Image (cartoon, rainbow, N blue to C red):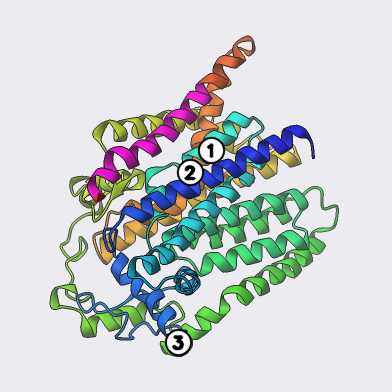
Amino acid sequence: MKRETIKEKRVEWLFLAGLCVFYFMWAYIQPLNASPDEEMRYLIPKFIFKHGTLPAGADPEIMNMVWGNSYGFNPIFSYIVSAIFMKAISFFSSEVFALLMAARTASVMFGVGTAAVTIKISKKLFEKNSCRWLFVVLITMWPQMIYVSSYVNTDAFALFTTACVIYSWILGLESNWSYKHCAYLGVALGLCALSYYNAYGFLVMSLVIFVFSVLLSTTLEVPWHKKIGILIKKGMFILLITLACAGWWFVRSFILYDGDIFGMAACNACAELYAAPEYKPSLRVTPFSQGMSLKTMLLSEGWLKRTLYSFIGYFGYFDYPLKWWMYKFYNRLILLGGIGTLIHVRSVFFQWKTEKWSKEKLFNWVMAASMIFPVLLSLYYSYYSDFQPQGRYILPIMIPFAYFLTVGFQKLVSHIPKKYENVGRLIIDILIAAVFCMGILSYVVVFLPNFV
């Protein structure tokens, strides 16, 4: 290993270690249920820890009798990991807070895991080291990303799985989908299926990038019908691995909930039976039931603004916003990075010149499309089911979002004359420092004063 590579590895490991400590600092100072529905979520790892089995969605021990249902209807893999940490710590202490911290450790580790995979992704996507670190810091020091990595939830695991899926796309494109990298994608998709439904757009886009990259490939010098054969053979291989990883959960749901593999209908039926009257799905007031237009919900009711602000960072039950100047910083950051991408939209999404470029453009299109699914799902849920303009519901867009912001800034500084190249590098370094400091300040200025 070259000396420079050893130095880079040391920097990366120090960064990950520091990040782990920082995320634990967020986790440590929160009382139980200071974060969205944590008490209700925590009932599931507690049940698994206590009984050594998985609960059914309607089990009384995990039910919330106000809402009339539980999180047990949804995939609970991250809660299983929390229960494993609880079991491990119980050999040393069974104190209440120790067990809660053990359960939160799963989210911390998924957050750090996202950072580790993001570093690998950055090396594939960006040539310059400064742009790599801008991409990494945008994701790992984003206030809402830090926040979901500090309490019991499934959002942190969903983000980790999206990182794994994207990294698998890159490896698959590089190798023309060797069986090794097909296996990586299968495992990543299996984990994604076990995370949270708002990340499922990455399952759909995996199919798109796999099919189109095989059919459009010019390095696979085989007739068209053989490409179809490769597509079917390797596609089935990916599917089998995905099912091997995640199929057990959906078979279990099929058995428990009379054929409802996703548990959604069963969850609604349970709420209809047991929820307080105003929370029964059939009686719940929604923008749709009120005859409100989508435009009114988005603008007059503040769905867009509240979703954006809580995507950036909003703590507790919408109790603790960031400072106004922090939102101003992030809004300017998003605006400038977005402009950088938009004014270079042709070079980012078009100009299919060579095999290398075609793969890059296909990847960019898929990354952009992946951002649409979580937003549409959150929009649909708020309009038809429960008005919840929460940024954590669209958090699976984080990696593609940070990618296009970084590309935008990279494109903007590329206009600086070559003889002033150091100025461009300095601008990116300043952005890295600013984003990093904002992550620290969100803890020191906002989070810490409200929870200590």
Place residue 286 in its image quadrant. bottom left
Magenta highlight on residue 381: no
Disc marking residue 135? 1
Q: Residues within 10 Å of mark 3 (few under 14, many from 20)?
A: some
Furthest residue to the front? 92
User: 79 and 56: which one is in front?
Assistant: 79
Q: Is residue 392 left or right of residue 65?
A: right
- Could you tell me if the residues under marks 1 and 2 are in contact, i.e. CB atoms within 8 Å? yes
Image depth: mark 2 or mark 3 in front: 2
Name the N-terminal-most of marks 1 and 3. Answer: 1
Amino acid identity at mark 2: Ile
Q: Is residue 219 above or below residue 129?
A: below
Magenta highlight on residue 437: yes
Amino acid identity at mark 3: Gly
User: Secondary structure under badge 3?
Assistant: loop
Task: Identify residue for label 2.
Answer: 139
Amino acid identity at mark 1: Phe
Q: CA distance from mark 1 to mark 3?
A: 42 Å
Q: Is residue 81 above or below residue 54?
A: above
Q: Position of residue 323 (x, y in %)?
A: 25, 36
Name the N-terminal-most of marks 2 and 3. Answer: 2
User: 42 and 59: which one is in front?
Assistant: 42
Q: Position of residue 162 (x, y in %)?
A: 53, 56
Residue appearing at x 31%, y 34% in the figure:
326
Task: Identify residue for label 3.
Answer: 259
